[in-house]
Image (cartoon, grey):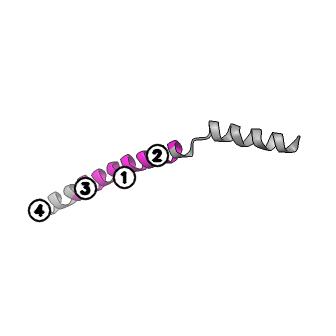
Amino acid sequence: MKKWSFYSIMILSLLTLTSCEAVGTIFKAGMWWGIFLVCIIVVILLLIFSKGKNS
């Protein structure tokens, strides 16, 4: 009986948990978050350098 419940738990977890999709989603979110941060840093640097030239 223990063997049967172990196999059923394994099959259930393999069918419900798709780790590749989870990892893919995390990397997509990380990529967009990184692009967003880089854009913000570039804008801040442009503002700093443009104020330095006007002084």
Select label 1 or label 4 by which is in front: 1
Element on which disc 4 rests: helix
Select label 3 or label 4 by which is in front: 3
Disc nearer the start of the sequence (1/4) = 1
Cα–Cα gap, marks 2 and 4: 44 Å
Disc nearer the start of the sequence (2/3) = 2
> Dominant secondary structure of the magenta stretch?
helix
Magenta range: 21-45
Residue tagged 2 = 24
Q: Per the image, is 38 magenta?
A: yes
* Residue found 57% across the figure and 41% down from its top: 18
Count neighbours of disc 4 (C-alpha within 10 A) and say few if under 14, some if 14 to 19, many if 20 or more: few
Disc nearer the start of the sequence (3/4) = 3
Q: Position of residue 31 (x, y in %)?
A: 38, 50
**Marks 1 & 3, CB-CB < 8 Å contact:** no
Disc nearer the start of the sequence (1/3) = 1
Cα–Cα gap, marks 2 and 3: 27 Å
Select label 1 or label 3 by which is in front: 1
Q: Position of residue 48 (x, y in %)?
A: 21, 59
Cα–Cα gap, marks 1 and 4: 29 Å
Quarter placement of the C terminus: bottom left
The numbered mark at residue 34 is: 1
Amino acid type of the residue tagged 2 in the rendering: Gly
Count neighbours of disc 3 (C-alpha within 10 A) and say few if under 14, some if 14 to 19, many if 20 or more: few
Residue tagged 4 = 53
Cα–Cα gap, marks 1 and 3: 12 Å
